[in-house]
Image (cartoon, rainbow, N blue to C red):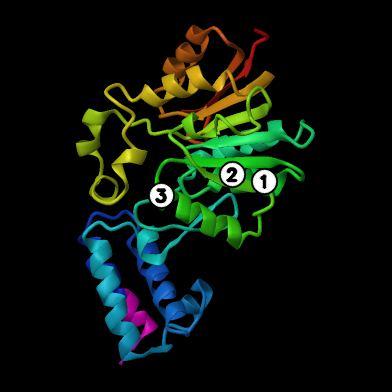
Amino acid sequence: MYNVNELLKKAVGILRESDTDTPVLDAELILLHVMDTAGQKTDRLKLVTRPDMAVGERIEAKYFELVNERSKGKPVQYITGRQEFMGFEMYISEGVLIPRPDTETVAERAIELAKEMEKPVIIDMCTGSGGIAISLAAAIPGSKVWAVDFSDSALECCRINVNRFKLENNIRVTKSDLFAGIMDEELIENTDIIVSNPPYIESGSIPELSINVRGYEPHSALDGGKDGLEFYRRITRDSVGFLKTNGILMFETGYDQGTKVRNIMEGDGCYHEINIEKDLAGYDRCIWGRKARI
């Protein structure tokens, strides 16, 4: 029988030989997950302060099974089914894009702008697990958020998260190929904000991504076409009919795409006051503008 210290020491050794930058954290998170699943719930503090805590054989066996999966590149979020986003512990399933801290820059700005509005109507386009939609609905009383995606896996994950945080009355989870499936909703020229973290990786760059990403995360949520800008063009073009005058269109962008996306919005001719904002690392991350009076 192992104790916590022995388990972690062995797991960290395995993970240090694999493609992970955080072997200690990964080892701890996976152990917490396995212990929780086995009914022996604990926390990271106890892992540190009680290294001699005994661990049963069933936990040991399951733990090293999952550590081996992680060593082959499987993201820890798919192993534990969890990822924190904007203070919410989101459920994450395989086949759904894992929320990144970069996207919090977009969510935070969207919340700031939505707070200036009275019961805003919001579309979270390409919602994935629903992180942006949930953040907005929780922060803005009276808001109505449409969480839109084409992926059945993403929509099921989003519904679970909406129910988890009891936001069923504020968020409507909808399957649609961008705007095509919501044309009959009461959204035409009545939407205050459209926010989107669309696929934006260049098709040819996907094979160059780390195994953690290219081998496990859905390519449909990554692939933005030949130049990575396909969805920005489509969403910019089609969003105009949904937004109110001075309504906001907001995107997450890749670190080097801010100017390119601004050019798309300016070239459309329907947006003004276009802003590019940087993330905590200093990269272009959030771009937004207002629908001009047409």
Nearer to us in this view, 157 or 111: 157
Residue 231 is left or right of residue 186, and the answer is left
**Image location of residue 84, percent across then percent down:** 52, 55
Residue 108 is left or right of residue 6, and the answer is right
**Image location of residue 226, percent across then percent down:** 26, 23
Q: Are marks 3 and 2 in contact (CB under 8 Å)?
A: no
Helix, strand or loop at label 2? It is helix
Q: Which residue is mark 3?
A: 152
Q: Which residue is mark 1?
A: 137
**Image location of residue 291, percent across then percent down:** 63, 16
Which numbered dot is residue 133?
2
Which residues are drawn in magenta?
A: 1-8
| Residue farthest to the right, as pictured | 118
Q: Earlier in the sequence, mark 3 or mark 1?
A: 1
Closest to the camera, between mark 3 and mark 2, is 3
Q: Quadrant of the C terminus?
A: top right
Q: Are marks 1 and 2 in contact (CB under 8 Å)?
A: yes
